[in-house]
Image (cartoon, rainbow, N blue to C red):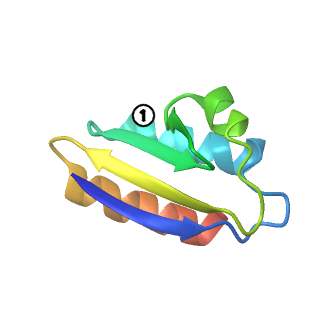
Amino acid sequence: MKSFKYVIKDEIGLHARPAGLVAKVAKEVSSKVTITCNGKSAEATRLMALIGLGAKCGNEVTVTIEGDDEEKAAAVMEKLFHENL
């Protein structure tokens, strides 16, 4: 299992556009990706669940990756967060 923490820098937070990118990338990896924020968790492949986390600018999220390609998936997800959130 791999995980990393990230503080949301996007002024609007985890809104539709970046949440859509996260869901798209999470569907492309075979590992299970889970995002936790403010005591709530969501599977990263579920767009509405991601938006429902209510992650705002300044909130810290924890991204957990578990599965066969977790090393690669963790690197891809971390890059995605840094570039889009």
Q: Quadrant of residue 53?
A: top right
Quarter of the image where the C terminus is located: bottom right
Q: Is residue 44 or residue 83 the one in the foreground?
A: 44
The answer to whether 30 appears left or right of 60 in the picture is: left
At horizontal 39% and vertical 60% (from top left) the residue drawn is 76
Query: What is the x, y in percent for residue 27?
Result: 42, 34
Query: What is the x, y in percent for residue 39?
Result: 57, 44
Q: Residues within 10 Å of mark 1 (few under 14, many from 20)?
A: some
At horizontal 52% and vertical 38% (from top left) the residue drawn is 41
The image shows a total of numbered marks equal to 1
Query: What is the x, y in percent for residue 6?
Result: 54, 68
* View extreme (right): residue: 12
Q: Judge whether 3 appears above or below 39 on screen.
A: below
Q: Is residue 66 or residue 77 the one in the foreground?
A: 66
The answer to whether 2 appears left or right of 15 in the picture is: left
Query: What is the x, y in percent for residue 14?
Result: 71, 51
* View extreme (left): residue: 68
Q: Is residue 5 or residue 48 the one in the foreground?
A: 5
The answer to whether 17 appears left or right of 77 in the picture is: right
Q: Name the residue under label 1.
A: 27
Q: In which quarter of the image is residue 82?
A: bottom right
Label 1 element class: helix
At horizontal 77% and vertical 57% (from top left) the residue drawn is 56
Residue type (three-letter) at the residue carrying disc 1: Lys
